[in-house]
Image (spheres, rainbow, N blue to C red):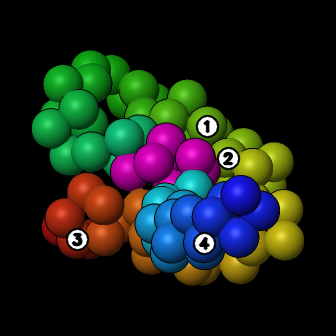
Amino acid sequence: MTKLLLMLALAAAPAIMAAPSTAAVAIASLTDPAKLTTLKGERAVDPRFQKCIWYLFQRTINQDPAVVIDKAMELKGGWA
């Protein structure tokens, strides 16, 4: 029984490790161009930018922020 559980855990490990972090998903959502175009006002994007910074500093402990940003941009389909 123990061997079976270990084998199942090892089989699922790549899928778990490949999943994007919460911060990457949140940043991808916050920087979605379709959502950004709906904002009105001179400083309307400021709260979204502040949330991105918060995710980078509070939710990426022991992670490289550049890697998290790259993953976020990959999730939303690129830098454009």
Residue 25 at what x, y percent from top left? 45, 48
Q: Which residue does the numbered mark 1 point to in the structure image?
A: 51
Q: Which of pointers 1 and 3 lies earlier in the amino acid sequence?
A: 1
Q: Residue sitting at 36 percent across and 41 percent down? A: 29
Is residue 17 at least partly visible in the picture?
A: no
Categorize mark 2 by other alpha carbons within 10 Å: few (<14), some (14-19), many (20+): some
Give neighbour class at mark 4: few <14, some 14-19, many 20+ (Cα, 10 Å). few
- Tag in front: 4 or 3: 4
Q: Nearer the viewer, mark 1 or mark 4?
A: 4
The C terminus: image quadrant: bottom left
Judging from the image, what secondary structure is the residue with disc 1 in?
Answer: helix
Q: Which residue is mark 2?
A: 55
Q: Secondary structure at mark 4?
A: helix
Marks 2 and 1, how far apart at CA: 6 Å
Q: Which residue is mark 3?
A: 78
Looking at the picture, which amino acid does disc 2 mark?
A: Tyr
Mark number, residue 7: 4
Asked whether 27 falls inside the magenta stretch, the response is: yes
Establish if 52 lies above or below 72.
above
Badges 2 and 1: C-beta atoms under 8 Å apart?
A: yes
The quadrant of the image that shows the N terminus is bottom right
Q: Which residues are magenta?
A: 22-28
Q: Residues within 10 Å of mark 1 (few under 14, many from 20)?
A: some
CA gap, disc 1 and disc 4: 39 Å
Depth check, front residue: 50 or 76: 76
